[in-house]
Structures are given as structure tokens and as C-alpha cells.
Image (spheres, rainbow, N blue to C red):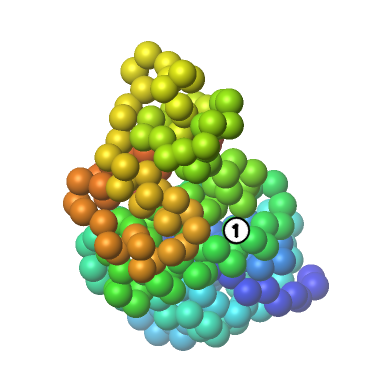
Amino acid sequence: MPLYREQGVVLRTQKLGEADRIVTLLTQGRGLLRAAAKGVRRTSSKFGARLEPFMVADLQLYEGRTLDTITQASTLGTYGPHISGDYERYRAGSVMVETAEQLSEGGPAPEQYRLLIGALRTLAQGRIAPELVRDGYLLRAMAAAGWAPGFDQCVRCGEPGPHSLVVVQLGGVVCEACKVPGTPRLDPGSIRLLAALQAGDWDAAVDSSDRQRGEAAGIVAAYTQWHLERGLRSLSTR
């Protein structure tokens, strides 16, 4: 059976038999990959800790009929302990990896891979509030998938902003003339925060209030789930 190498970030794991696991990874070259890791649940396993969620590894695998098998793993990014050891970081990271899995179905997704690695690195460093890292990642991941929201001008008629009304189904802010019944009106600072998160402007993002972060988070969650056309289990625990 042919051997090959890949780099990947562990999205989730599940038990397989007495001592094995199935590891779901987002890889650099093959997109989503589910592979068996033999014996990693034994205390004597040499690389079990390298295949925990949020870890990034260089892998050697061999192809199987139904599942490929991981034979070697060396660590490239030790983000797992720093994220899993903090509840808020863990919740944010769980949303991120679940979203990455849904957005990367169907083949290689190199931009999604790079975005997730960068976001996990930032989350693990702990210098920026987890909810900001999460929402910034979600907005940029959706943009990479072709669903970039608009926060500068009315997404329906193009009227220049600033605008404070957001229609998730239309893809961003709208002017007074284009609003629909039930359109939420946000604090102007919340719109600026959404634009900063999408642009990766962390200096502007951290200079936001709790109210603005709460409003922005609600829009990001609704926008992400609208385009994924399904709920995110990890968001329901927020």
C-alpha cells in the first residue's frame, strides 16, 4: 500500500475499538481527511498527544481500502494544550474547527487551511479575547468560501455608508430605504467592529465595548449558519 506525507490540523477524534482512534484532519494538500491512528489511546503510545484536537502535525500515512492509517506524526503547532486548557478558548476553537470542517468538504481547501492555522495560533497565544478571534476567523473563512459580507455600503443599492442596519440574508448592511421588516439596528461601533474583524485589524477590534462585541457576535453567528444552511453544534453551547 502506498505511503504518503501530509500536513494537517486535527479537527476532532472519535474512538475506534479498544485502543485506536479515527482522526478527522484538515490537510494542506488533500482537504478533509479521516484516518485511523492505531494504538493512540494506550499510555505507551508515542504520538497520541500529537493527534489531539487543535494540534498541527506533519504526518506519514498509508492508503487503505476504507480508511488511511497514520504511521508517524511530528508536531508542527502545539496549540492543543493552550486552547483545551482554557474554557473560553476551547469553546471558540470548537466553533472554528467545526466551521472549517463544513467549509472544506469536497476537495483541497488551501486557503481554509491557512486561515484555520493562523486563527488557532492567535487563539493559543491568548493575547486577544477568544470571542474576537472566533468571529474574525468566521468572517474571513466565509469570505474565502465566496460569501464575503459587506459593511461599508448598502449591499442592495450601493448607497455609501456608514449604515447601522444589517440584513443577514442580503449579506451585510443596508440603508434606510432598503431595510426590511425586523432589520436589527446596531450600535455604529458594532459595524466598525465587524469590518475590523473581517479585515484582521486587531488594534481596532480590541478597542470595542462588551455591547459591541455581543452585537457583532450575534450577526456573525447568524450569517455563518445562514450560509452553511445548518446549525453549528458548538455555537449552541455559547
Q: Which quadrant would the C terminus be assigned to in this image?
A: top left
Residue to which mark 1 is pinned: 112
**Residue 169 pos. (x, y %):** 49, 26
Q: Amino acid at mark 1?
A: Gln
**Residue 86 pos. (x, y %):** 23, 68
Left or right of 119, for residue 89: left
**Residue 138 pos. (x, y %):** 46, 51
Query: Between 83 and 44, which is closer to the camera in this rendering?
Result: 83
**Residue 227 pos. (x, y %):** 53, 34
Left or right of 190, for residue 110: right
* Residue shown at 52% from the left, 27% from the top: 170
Crowding around mark 1 (Cα neighbors within 10 Å: few <14, some 14 to 19, many 20+) is many
Left or right of 115, for residue 86: left
Query: Between 35 and 156, which is closer to the camera in this rendering?
Result: 156
* Residue shown at 64% from the left, 44% from the top: 146
* Residue shown at 67% from the left, 73% from the top: 6
Q: Residue furthest left?
A: 210
Q: Residue furthest front?
A: 160
Q: Which quadrant would the N terminus be assigned to in this image?
A: bottom right
Left or right of 97, for residue 90: left
**Looking at the picture, does residue 22 appear above or below residue 234?**
below
**Quadrant housing residue 134:** bottom left
* Residue shown at 34% from the left, 60% from the top: 205
